[in-house]
Image: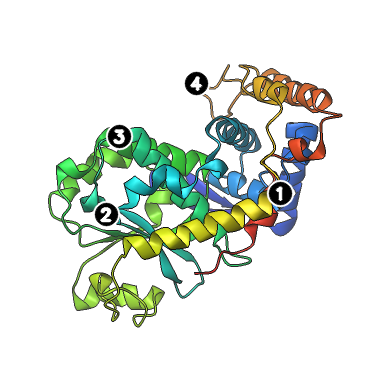
């Protein structure tokens, strides 16, 4: 096992394939049988993302995974549909581009200067919808995406620190290791003070993935390194004059939603989550916070045992439920890429 320094005093570990496999097995033992009911969230690839996000600390990774499961059961991000968030998209403030970067990663374009609503919850809900859609459109074998953030028209009133903080929380805690590259394109001078305010909310690994790019020849080499300029919009230094078209994008999203709905339940209504599972996973014993503060280890050993025991109780309670109900968080079939 090797390591390298992160920003600050944190050290990033690098594990061999054998060590990684051992960590995955350790996580599976800690979360118990409930992993079988949520095979996508508890797949090897997913567990590795949680481990990398928590620098291979198994207790922290397990806590993060359990909190993500709890959030998904409460928030139900996979059930958000275009019609629920269409009004948030009218100005093109966030949309999935119709091209990939040179590594085959999905591209999300963000234009905070095009903010058109005042509802923080609505803005977050639309962001979550875009994240879910982007993940479904990832190429086979690709886990990460690119964010292109255009600052044209941006001013400090365009976004609040509160929304930014909640955004960072959701993206970093519930979508770990999904960001491969974030490009801040032409941020104004005043953005530096805003960046200083939000930096404490950004984890070191995320911070390292962010690049500042300006419309000058030297910076634009970065864009050419990652993108086919014949497909990239001219707003980012590319050579295509294509612009966001709300009606066309709405049609794309409706088609994507239909594909997802058909894959979930061909010819039938969506299965409901057993209430007993919801209640059990939302109980205080799901995630134990005792002994967390001031410690490098997240949760005491007794806390982890209690959480694991609780998950086993849940597993026993849902035995005998219809198989469709057991597999609510299983979106393996949905991971088939949605065509751009």
Mark sitting earlier along the chain (4/3): 3
- Near mark 3 (Cα within 10 A), the count class, few <14, some 14-19 or many ≥20, is few
Q: Which residue is mark 1?
A: 43
Q: CA distance from mark 4 to mark 3?
A: 33 Å
Mark sitting earlier along the chain (4/2): 2
Mark sitting earlier along the chain (1/3): 1
Q: Are marks 2 and 1 in contact (CB under 8 Å)?
A: no
- For this orientation, the residue located farthest to the right is 320
Q: CA distance from mark 1 to mark 3?
A: 35 Å
Query: What secondary structure is found at the residue carrying circle 2?
Result: loop
- For the point 26% across and 54% down, the residue is 91
Mark sitting earlier along the chain (2/1): 1
Q: Which residue is mark 4?
A: 293
Query: What secondary structure is found at the residue carrying circle 1?
Result: loop
- Near mark 1 (Cα within 10 A), the count class, few <14, some 14-19 or many ≥20, is some
Q: Which residue is mark 2?
A: 91
Query: What secondary structure is found at the residue carrying circle 4?
Result: loop
Q: CA distance from mark 3 to mark 2?
A: 15 Å
Q: Are marks 4 and 3 in contact (CB under 8 Å)?
A: no
Mark sitting earlier along the chain (1/4): 1
Q: CA distance from mark 2 to mark 1?
A: 37 Å
User: Looking at the picture, how far across and down is residue 69, in whole percent?
Assistant: 61, 35
Coloring applied to the structure: rainbow
> Is 276 placed left or right of 288 in the picture?
right
- Near mark 2 (Cα within 10 A), the count class, few <14, some 14-19 or many ≥20, is some
Q: Nearer the viewer, residue 239 or 210?
A: 239
Q: CA distance from mark 4 to mark 2?
A: 43 Å
| Picture disc at residue 13 | none
Q: Which residue is mark 3?
A: 119
* Quadrant hosting residue 38: top right
């Amino acid at each position: 096992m090797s390591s390298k320094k992160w920003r600050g005093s944190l050290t990033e570990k690098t594990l061999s394939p054998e060590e990684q496999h051992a960590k995955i097995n350790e996580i599976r033992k800690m979360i118990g049988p409930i992993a079988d009911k949520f095979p996508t969230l508890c797949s090897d690839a997913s567990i590795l993302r949680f481990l990398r996000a928590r620098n291979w600390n198994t207790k922290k990774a397990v806590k993060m995974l359990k909190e993500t499961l709890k959030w998904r059961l409460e928030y139900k991000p996979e059930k958000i549909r275009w019609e629920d968030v269409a009004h948030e998209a009218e100005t093109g403030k966030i949309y999935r581009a119709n091209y990939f970067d040179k590594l085959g990663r999905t591209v999300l374009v963000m234009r905070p200067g095009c903010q058109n609503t005042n509802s923080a919850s609505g803005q977050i809900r639309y962001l979550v919808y875009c994240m879910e859609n982007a993940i479904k459109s990832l190429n086979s074998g690709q886990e990460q995406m690119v964010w292109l953030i255009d600052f044209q028209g941006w001013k400090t009133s365009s976004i609040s620190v509160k929304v930014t903080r909640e955004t960072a929380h959701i993206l970093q805690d519930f979508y770990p290791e999904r960001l491969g590259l974030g490009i801040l394109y032409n941020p104004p001078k005043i953005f530096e003070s805003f960046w200083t305010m939000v930096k404490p909310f950004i984890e070191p690994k995320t911070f390292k993935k962010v690049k500042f790019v300006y419309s000058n020849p030297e910076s634009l080499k970065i864009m050419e390194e990652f993108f086919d300029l014949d497909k990239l919009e001219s707003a980012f230094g590319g050579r295509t004059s294509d612009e966001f078209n709300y009606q066309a994008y709405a049609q794309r999203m409706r088609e994507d939603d239909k594909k997802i709905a058909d894959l979930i339940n061909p010819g039938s209504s969506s299965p409901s989550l057993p209430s007993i599972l919801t209640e059990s996973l939302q109980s205080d014993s799901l995630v134990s916070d005792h002994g967390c503060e001031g410690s490098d280890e997240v949760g005491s050993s007794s806390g982890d045992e209690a959480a694991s025991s609780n998950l086993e109780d849940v597993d026993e309670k849902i035995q005998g439920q219809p198989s469709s109900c057991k597999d609510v968080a299983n979106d393996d079939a949905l991971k088939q890429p949605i065509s751009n």
